[in-house]
Amino acid sequence: MVLLAIDLQKALVVEDLYNFEGFVENMKKLLSEARKRGVEVIYVRHDAGEGSGMTYGDEDFEIYDELAPKAGEKVFVKTVNSSFSNKELCKYLEEKGEDTVIIAGLQTNYCIDATIKSAFDRGYNVIVPEGCNSTFDNDYMTGETTYRYYNEDVWDSVADVVAMDEVFETA
């Protein structure tokens, strides 16, 4: 079992997120509990390309301070929504023989959704902790509606969406 902490970057971890404070607190608890239990935490950052403000060298590309990796934790970079687009990450997980991934981070309707479905397609058991993904309002839905739609309806056939206190008991 590993925890994939996705796109917890300064450009995205901002107060406009649905349930911003709850999300940050839940992520802090999840990261702390994973480390305490010896579950490897792997970070994945999104590189939106030169001129985007979210690429190597940009402050907003860096991981939000309160959720930052500890020394020695791996950080992979992706350029499209699914974390599994990074072949080095895929190879690393395969070499470790992992069969279960906990997926948390940003944004619910983009990189989290794509990563969950890609993990499922690759045969992983997928665990999604409640309150550990979020997104922004968009032209069609509020951040809350988007969060609820994916967590309560879309992912029910490809992942186990579980309460925080059940995350490490699920595998």
Image (cartoon, rainbow, N blue to C red):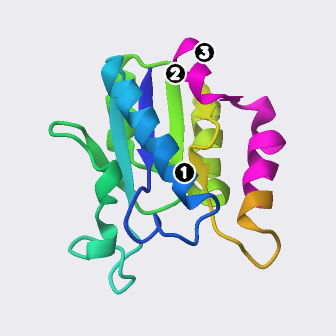
Dominant secondary structure (helix, strand or loop) of the stretch shown in magenta: helix
Residue of label 1: 23
Tell me where residue 45 appears, x and y as whole percent: 37, 56
Dots 2 and 3: beta carbons under 8 Å? Answer: no
Q: Which residue is at a point 52% across and 21% down the rendered structure image?
A: 100
User: Disc 1 residue type?
Assistant: Phe
Q: Quadrant of the N terminus?
A: top left
Q: Quadrant of the C terminus?
A: top right
Question: What kind of element bears circle 3?
Answer: loop
Left or right: 135, with 28 as reference point: right
Tell me where residue 18 appears, x and y as whole percent: 64, 62
Q: Quadrant of residue 59?
A: bottom left
In-front residue for pair 109/167: 167
Q: Nearer the viewer, mark 1 or mark 3?
A: 1
In magenta stretch: residue 30: no
Could you tell me if residue 11 is visible in this image?
yes
In-front residue for pair 158/16: 16
Left or right: 165, with 44 as reference point: right
Q: What segment is highlighted magenta in the picture? A: 146-171
Q: Earlier in the sequence, mark 1 or mark 3?
A: 1
Q: Quadrant of residue 118?
A: top right
User: Disc 3 residue type?
Assistant: Thr
Residue of label 2: 100
Q: Which residue is at a point 84% across and 42% down the rendered structure image?
A: 153
Total labels: the figure holds 3
Residue of label 3: 170
Question: What kind of element bears circle 2?
Answer: strand
Question: What kind of element bears circle 1?
Answer: helix
Tell me where residue 156 appears, x and y as whole percent: 79, 33
Q: CA distance from mark 2 to mark 3?
A: 10 Å
Q: Nearer the viewer, mark 1 or mark 2?
A: 1
